[in-house]
Amino acid sequence: MMAIGVPVQRAQVENLYVEAMLLADEAHAAFAAQRDLGKARSDALTQISLACESLKTTTRLMHVIAWLLHRRAMFAGDPGAGPNDSAARIGEPVAADWDICAGFDVSIRRVIAASERLFERIVQIEAGWEAPRQRPPVQQLLAQLEARL
């Protein structure tokens, strides 16, 4: 990480952490409410589908939160949190089955979609932070001049 980018990255991580925790709380409440409604209807297939998508959504959000906590530890200088740790990589997404989700209430679909968008944002941030840094054009020219002299 470039030293100049660290404050910006730290702020991104803190903001995303708050967003992820709020979304996790919202997901918990939405899935719990839907489970209670499903029990009243006693639709077993819907209950199983809901449980599976709840698990996928929770897993997705926990991956995001773990990644953010690892980044916080790196910023804090924790010797146990390094850039090459497995926790430093967000990994592959756990995709929702939108054919099944189509039968859920709008509130559940919105939470699932929001968790997928958040995961994708983390993937993009990670890729941007890990991409090789390009020198600004002026610095490239100065380096070329210096090499020639």
Image (spheres, helix red, strand yellow):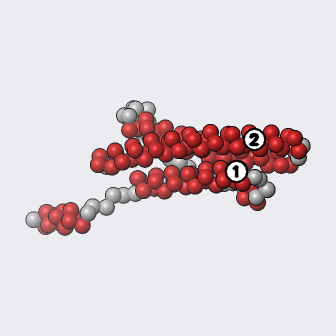
Residue kind at label 1, given as amino acid type: Ser
From the viewer's side, name the closer residue of 18 and 122.
Answer: 18
Residue holding disc 2:
33
**52 vs 103, nearest the viewer:** 103
Q: Taking 53 as reference, is 143 left or right?
A: left
Residue in the foreground of this view, choosing between 111 and 51: 111
Residue topped by disc 1:
107
118 left or right of 10 in image: right
Left or right position of 120 against 83: right
Residue 28 — which label? none
- Residue shown at 77% from the left, 53% from the top: 104
| Residue lying at the far top of the rendered structure | 79
- Residues 127 and 103: in front is 103
Q: CA distance from mark 1 to mark 2?
A: 10 Å
- Residue 52, position as x, y percentages in the image: 75, 46
Q: Taking 143 as reference, is 20 above or below it?
A: above
